Amino acid sequence: MDSRRPPLAPVCPTLPEYVRHWAETTPERRAFSFVEHPAPHSRGVHRTLTWRRLDVRVRALAARLAGQAGPGDRVALLCPQGTEYVTAFLAALAAGLVAVPLYPPGLPGHADRLAGVLADACPAVVVTTRRARDEVREFVAGDRPRIVVADEVTDDEGRDWRPVAPDPGATAYLQYTSGSTRAPAGVEISHGNVVANARQALAAYGADTRPVTCVGWLPLYHDMGLVLSVAAPVVRGALSALMDPAAFLHEPVRWLRLLAAHPNAISAAPNFAYDYCVATVTAEQKEGLRLDGVTALINGSEPVRPGTAARFHATFAAQGLTPETHCPSYGLAEATVFVCAARPDEPLRRFALDRDALAAGKALPARPDDPRAVLLAGCGSPADQRVRVADPVTRALLSEGEVGEIWVQGPNVGRGYWNRDSEDVFGAEFAGAAAEPGRWLRTGDLGTVLEGQLVVTGRLKDLIIVDGRNHYPQDVEATAQEAHAAVRRDRLAAFAVPGAAGGERVVVVAEHARTARLAELDVPGVLRAVRGAVSTRHGLRLADVVLVPPGTVPRTSSGKVSRALTRARYLEGAYGGQDRVAAGAAG
């Protein structure tokens, strides 16, 4: 049934109108399929909604929500990953309410963030499921929002309900930022923003003209998970095959099997996920696995590491995976998500840049084998939007090869931050004679344009400045994790702390590998290796290196290491005790 080419998508102003269209034109086609893994080595149990069934559930839940809240009220989604999450999100939009994609209170390490976001959004209603009902009730008891249990709402409730027609310019949902550099802020995404960005993503990855399946394990409260696994398939009328992030982390081959099971699959993951597959998928698990039908694998990390793509494709080349499927991309919540993307079927563009020149704001070529070269991947060209690079201080337009702040303009750029003054971020204007007209989004990300490709170099707020020289923390982190096998990949943070005479000192906090026991490690030897590698490659003396147990370095809700929170905990003395003493002694 699903191998047939779906009809071309119409142009609808909102996602609920797309749901109704597909329910009328392709009612029996599969819309969303959630794969549960009830046992540790389960191959997966599929629970599927057709477009007709999705429409019935959306209407029923929208009717309940419309009776509990008024237009513009916020509806917090505290559902586990699954089809109920999809239904609740679309129902809130259909009822003319403002969805707030979140997660149940049981997500480890993120209770404080959840409480802060709920306090900021002030939802009138919280939607959850039977599975999470008790913990949600306990968590929100003091705030007293109404609680709707999605899987207890009967189909009959939507029988006589008539959907509203939201203004495409009205806010559809609040996408809270991950909090990697500051407290989470809710970006107001309009109905028009999310439809535009879904269409941009579909066009960028060639999914607007050929049948595809969106395969995903990214959490649906995250911007990329929401757009790629919900909005884009709704706009295209394509199947979305979902799994839980925890299921991927427990056994990453599950993601690869899901990709193999669906022809023309499109999926997205950060750097660590590709490296995780390389490290953990066994030869036995690879047997019978075919990945030659994968259309695109999106890597949206900042910056994208060419070495990660190379290792991943070398590991799974025998399974038919081709290097051209890897699509480095760039995006952010303030632009709904997608901004630039490398296209499938095109070779990965690699750039070797001189580290000293890059620190001085110039992207000059270097030999790839030069130990002081920085290797970065091109993130392609804009997806039906405009991207420019500006001097972050003067706001002057910069030329190709000059490093500055990435600015974006397009129909996908959000309305602003909820409850915050955001004119400086969403209403920036260029200065000087060569100024580009209109209002622009200041992303806070640093990058340059080379050979028509956007190359992302880092975050403006994360930049480490020592003795007048700029250092990118992810560059320092990459050196540190390569210095010794005991340093856990992608679980470390480099940041600056106040030093003497107003200067800055640089600190690295790193988790040790799960395979290593801290009591048995030569901790001073590990720390000497990290210090020596950073000194040699960056000319940078680390004031402190702290080795901590796995799970100690805090991460954002999207899985990225939170340098800001790691820095705050370091300054509070949270990384104390024996590990801290060992680190100090090695200095």
Image (cartoon, rainbow, N blue to C red):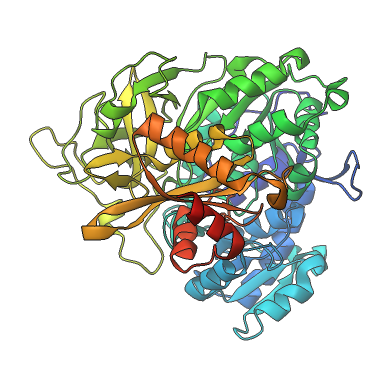
Examine the rendering and report whether any part of residue 283 can be seen.
yes
Q: Note whether 225 is above or below 286 in the view shown.
A: below
Give the side of residue 457 with respect to residue 105, left or right.
left
Residue shown at 45% from the left, 27% from the top: 379
Q: Position of residue 337 (x, y in %)?
A: 48, 43
Quadrant in the rendering for residue 63: bottom right
Give the side of residue 97 with respect to residue 366, left or right.
right
Q: Position of residue 566 (x, y in %)?
A: 49, 58
Looking at the picture, tell me which residue is in the foreground, 541 or 202: 541
Looking at the picture, tell me which residue is in the foreground, 308 or 464: 464
Q: Position of residue 562 (x, y in %)?
A: 50, 54
Q: Position of residue 296 (x, y in %)?
A: 62, 25
Give the side of residue 171 with respect to residue 42, left or right.
left
Q: Note whether 106 is above or below 387 in the view shown.
A: below
Residue that lies at the very extreme toward the left in this rendered image: 433
Q: Give the number of marks.
A: 0
Q: Quadrant of the N terminus?
A: top right
Residue shown at 76% from the left, 30% from the top: 256
Quadrant in the rendering for residue 105: bottom right
